[in-house]
Image (cartoon, grey):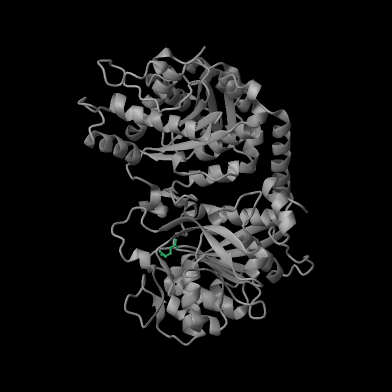
């Protein structure tokens, strides 16, 4: 059946109609289909991984898939969230600070997303309130339904228009039953009503427990979770059951019976060896086929494209499984207790490791505990270190001690953002003799403020979205290590307020530090390195390279670090590392069809 005729009558927004159905100009009902994933029972089931894997399965079939994450919180973006509580703040090329799930989508789908792919309640309400202030509701009382829910549907339809997607893939944050996402769920109910059958597919992710004392799977919580969804007027079409082990037929039948979903559309999503296998798990179980069937999309599927995409992905999985070598990288972290705060760095290490046939083990080092006296012991077991991004003062001296030790002992080092800044401070203090060098973020009155606020930051007031954010071009110094990594220029993503103070650059360079990547007009230092004669691999970047590393396109920064760490660990028979960008011809081809060569 086609879309609901209400949608084509939606013009009348001003008259006496009870229906407020704003549909953005240019919207073609029925052109774009919707998949909506909602979580029940509890959070922490891996909804983001499940959703991005399912979105990838659809994209692999040659469909244009546009994901959108709907967050319940009132923050306008994720920039003001503490990564310790909420996981890392991911940054998109357009500068959007968003939930780390957007990183999961970018890595799974291997393409860049934008602010259109991320909505929070804060954004939705702000748009409604702004419109009210400018008289946009023509005297009506502004209500959760239809105005706020209307705004949610607007966002989805705008995304459909902007991307010309075959499928807009909606992931609702939180769990069904949360007060803060209730109106999103209501908006999805309306969306399905308006778009009509076969245009919206509801997927409920649920959880089947297996209490160790009972030794059998119990489905009651799952049943109740789905029932709660049905109380919101949503009949799921597909149920995916998270569980430790494969969900038995008996349990799936029971869930089917209580939820009106045929048993063949109740799937087991049990734990598996690696998250990279989830797309295969979904395909094997037929979840993708069930979505395609429900949405009547079979005629848009390209089977050849799917075969190729699967082979490429499985090539990655097989390399991951067969990696023989091993290195140990020390992570100097303030948030050492919460790994989600460093999710993209951990992924980037994995991508580089797979490329180099290496398992990367991590050693978490709490920088606040490290001093000049203890640093040798703290780093004795690692083959390389990462000093990651951070804000504020905590742990700074420990990081500087680690960087000094690493520089002096030839320990491979990658400094990221704050870590890059600490490397500059360490060099200024211990090589250039500027004893009191520091960042004005840490000590505003220091004698040598080698790291200082960016000029544009001096006038910034308030906190939200006010850093130097998003993708910026970087000009690379010929003949440097960075030139081997990137050629003559590259694009990196940023999130910072401070930079290397330009007046200290000559002194640092005279003392041997090489700034090999700069902003196009030369004013901001983006990459530093020590020459090969001084150190096997000592590299820092003001950017966040972890945000753009992908399984099939690892970041050269992490490749360089892992390769140098392997050598440090004693793998003396390694061929010289060739960065993916080193051969421009090969690189141009690789950009289109990313492959992993031996
Ligand atoms: N706090 C530093 C700055 O604002 C570094 C930021 C970061 O590591 N992301 O410049």
The image shows a total of numbered marks equal to: 0
Quarter of the image where ligand 1 sits: bottom left
Residue drawn 59% across the image and 53% down it? 549
Viewer-nearest residue: 78 or 127: 127
> Is residue 115 in view from this perspective?
yes
In the image, is residue 266 above or below residue 69? above
In the image, is residue 574 above or below residue 179? below
> Is residue 370 in view from this perspective?
no
Please provide percent x and percent y for residue 492. Answer: 54, 58
Please provide percent x and percent y for residue 429. Answer: 46, 83
Q: Picture quarter containing residue 580? A: bottom right
Q: Does 29 sit left or right of 320 as displayed?
A: left
Viewer-nearest residue: 374 or 321: 321
Viewer-nearest residue: 530 or 261: 530
Q: Does 107 sit left or right of 464 as displayed?
A: right
Please provide percent x and percent y for residue 268. Answer: 59, 28
User: In the rendered image, which quarter contains the C terminus?
Assistant: bottom right
Please provide percent x and percent y for residue 457. Answer: 35, 64
Q: Picture quarter containing residue 41? A: top left
Viewer-nearest residue: 288 or 516: 516
């Amino acid at each position: 059946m086609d879309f609901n005729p209400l949608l084509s009558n939606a013009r009348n927004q001003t008259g006496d109609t009870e229906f407020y159905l704003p549909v953005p100009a240019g919207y073609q009902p029925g052109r774009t289909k919707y998949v909506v994933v909602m979580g029940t029972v509890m959070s922490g089931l891996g909804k983001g991984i499940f959703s991005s894997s399912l979105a990838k399965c659809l994209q692999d079939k040659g469909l244009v898939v546009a994901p959108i994450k709907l967050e319940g919180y009132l923050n306008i973006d994720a920039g003001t969230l503490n990564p310790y509580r909420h996981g890392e703040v991911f940054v998109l090329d357009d500068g959007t600070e968003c939930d780390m799930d957007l990183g999961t989508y970018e890595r799974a789908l291997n393409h860049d997303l934008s602010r259109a792919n991320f909505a929070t309640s804060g954004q939705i309400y702000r748009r409604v309130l702004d419109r009210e202030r400018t008289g946009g509701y023509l005297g009506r009382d502004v209500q959760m339904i239809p105005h706020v829910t209307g705004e949610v549907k607007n966002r989805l339809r705008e995304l459909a228009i902007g991307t010309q997607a075959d499928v807009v893939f909606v992931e609702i944050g939180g769990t069904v039953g949360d007060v803060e996402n209730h109106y999103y769920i209501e908006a999805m109910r309306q969306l399905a009503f308006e778009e009509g059958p076969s245009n919206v597919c509801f997927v409920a992710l649920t959880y089947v427990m297996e209490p160790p004392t009972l030794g059998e799977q119990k489905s009651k919580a799952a049943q109740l979770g789905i029932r709660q969804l049905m109380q919101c007027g949503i009949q799921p079409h597909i149920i995916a059951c998270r569980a430790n082990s494969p969900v038995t037929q008996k349990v799936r039948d029971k869930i089917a019976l209580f939820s009106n979903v045929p048993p063949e559309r109740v799937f087991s999503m049990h734990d598996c060896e690696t998250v990279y296998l989830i797309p295969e798990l979904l395909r094997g179980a037929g979840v993708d086929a069930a979505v395609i069937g429900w949405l009547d999309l079979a005629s848009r599927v390209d089977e050849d494209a799917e075969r190729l995409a699967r082979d490429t992905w499985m090539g990655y999985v097989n390399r991951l499984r067969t990696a023989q070598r091993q290195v140990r990288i020390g992570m100097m972290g303030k948030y050492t207790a919460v790994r989600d705060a460093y999710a993209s760095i951990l992924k980037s290490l994995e991508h580089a490791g797979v490329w180099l046939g290496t398992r990367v083990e991590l050693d978490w080092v709490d920088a606040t505990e490290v001093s000049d006296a203890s640093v040798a012991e703290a780093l004795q077991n690692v083959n390389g270190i990462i000093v990651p991004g951070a804000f504020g003062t905590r742990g700074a001296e420990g990081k500087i001690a680690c960087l000094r030790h690493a520089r002096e002992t030839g320990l491979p080092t990658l400094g990221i953002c704050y870590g890059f800044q600490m490397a500059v401070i360490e060099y200024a203090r211990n090589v250039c003799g500027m004893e009191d060098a520091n960042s004005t973020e840490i000590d505003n009155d220091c004698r040598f403020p080698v790291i200082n606020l960016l000029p544009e930051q001096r006038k910034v007031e308030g906190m939200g979205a006010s850093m130097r954010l998003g993708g910026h071009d970087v000009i690379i110094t010929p003949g440097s290590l960075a030139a081997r990594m990137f050629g003559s220029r590259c694009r990196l993503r940023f999130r910072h307020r401070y930079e290397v103070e330009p007046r200290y650059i000559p002194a640092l360079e005279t003392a041997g530090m090489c700034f090999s990547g700069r902003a196009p007009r030369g004013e901001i230092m983006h990459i530093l390195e020590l020459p090969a004669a001084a150190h096997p691999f000592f590299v820092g970047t003001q950017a966040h390279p972890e945000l753009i590393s992908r399984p099939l396109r690892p970041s050269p920064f992490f490749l360089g670090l892992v390769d140098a760490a392997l050598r440090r660990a004693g793998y003396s028979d390694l061929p010289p590392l060739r960065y993916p960008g080193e051969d421009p011809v090969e690189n141009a081809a690789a950009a289109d069809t990313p492959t992993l060569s031996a």
